[in-house]
Image (cartoon, grey):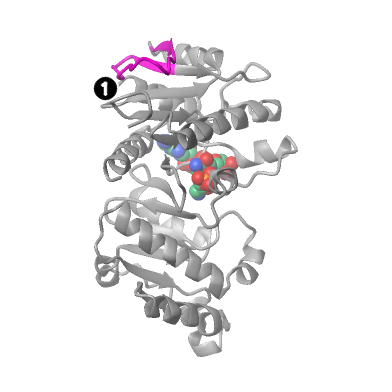
Amino acid sequence: MSTSSKIPRLAISAGEPAGIGPDVVLAAALRDWPAELVVIADRGMLEARAQLLGLQVDLRPYDAESESPSCAGSLSIIHEPLAINARAAIAESANAAGVLAALKRTTLGCISGEFDAMVTAPVNKAVIADSGVPFSGHTEYLAELTGSDQVVMLLAAKELRVALATTHIPLASVPAAIDQNLLLDVLRVMDKDLRSKFAIASPQISVLGLNPHAGEGGHLGMEDLEVIAPALEQAISEGINVSGPWPADTAFNRRLSTETDAYLAMYHDQGLPVLKFASFGAAVNITLGLPIIRTSVDHGTAFDLAGTGKADPSSFFAALESALGLISAQ
Ligand SMILES: NC(=O)C1=CN([C@@H]2O[C@H](COP(=O)(O)OP(=O)(O)OC[C@H]3O[C@@H](n4cnc5c(N)ncnc54)[C@H](O)[C@@H]3O)[C@@H](O)[C@H]2O)C=CC1
Ligand SMILES: NCC(=O)COP(=O)(O)O
């Protein structure tokens, strides 16, 4: 447990204030949780969103010294001010600094042991980048802030886990980014964390190829033969249970998927559409390879739904439950 509490303390970043992050955080506050939920966000923004949604949520100032178990209708809050009044669906890059400050406070609190885990609502990467701060995602940001050499984005649903070898880079940059060292580092992190965090005794990882039909014997690209296959051989020699490279179009077939604990996709839109088609709303984004626990939703900021009451909070609830499970597994 955190340094000053006996029940788990979950730090929550509310994400982009114009998006549905505040909506799903407020929805979580209406439930009981076996934890203290501490949101780090602008108090006025959350109050205004609660009013817009017609929700009654008591925002109690966070007190690090006293344990405040979550009870339905209340939430502990650390006020992290935004530069200007946030409005649902209207993104303001002037508020990006406040969003990042909340994320930093959340992360540093986990590193120090003040919080047991962090659960993030979605940020809008373009809004932050438009403010002039280079930012491609929580995953990369957390790797840098925690000084982690290799982190891995894993989306986990009940029957399918999909990790990514590359995350938020242009598609044109993917082939050059994938080399044997990267794949080995990613596979080592996956193998270690699937054992320690998911209690899988001997994780079976199925690795997708990069090119159509995994390169069709070299006729449709050489990366599968020259980069991926040798990396898998090396991983096997280290005792990691990997198979592949599998042609991505058929790799999610019923037989292989039942034998697979996690897939490794080469890039974002190779693996995530399959996962989201199967489980959108029920999946959780977990960053492997960090010294802290971080879970998140499977969706983005959905400006079209912010403040309407139509945002489904299920994935945020699943992310909270997953964080609690990961705390217990430590
Ligand atoms: N963890 C994070 O911080 C993530 C952030 N994003 C960011 O979100 C922004 C928007 O991304 P999009 O690709 O448009 O994806 P999106 O997930 O925001 O929206 C895609 C579609 O799904 C619907 N949707 C999303 N969440 C929903 C929910 N909880 N309930 C019901 N319907 C929902 C939206 O209305 C929209 O039709 C981008 O800037 C992206 O970078 C995207 C994914 C994760
Ligand atoms: N599509 C998943 C995603 O973009 C999540 O990114 P991150 O902000 O968790 O790194």
| Quadrant into which the C terminus falls | top left
Q: Does residue 162 appear anywhere in the picture?
A: yes
The amino acid beneath tag 1 is Asp
Left or right of 200? Residue 310 is right
- 3 over 62 or under it: above or below: below
Which region is colored magenta? 57-76
Residue 149 x %, y %: 55, 56
Residue 66 painted magenta = yes
- Say which residue label 1 marks: 32
Residue 70 x %, y %: 31, 19
Of residues 49 and 117, the one drawn nearer to the viewer in this rendering: 117
**Res 170 quadrant in image:** bottom right
Q: Which residue is drawn at 49% across and 86% down?
A: 216
Of residues 199 and 126, the one drawn nearer to the viewer in this rendering: 199
Characterize the local packing of mark 1: few (<14), some (14-19) or many (20 or more) Cα atoms within 10 angstroms: some
Residue 67 painted magenta = yes
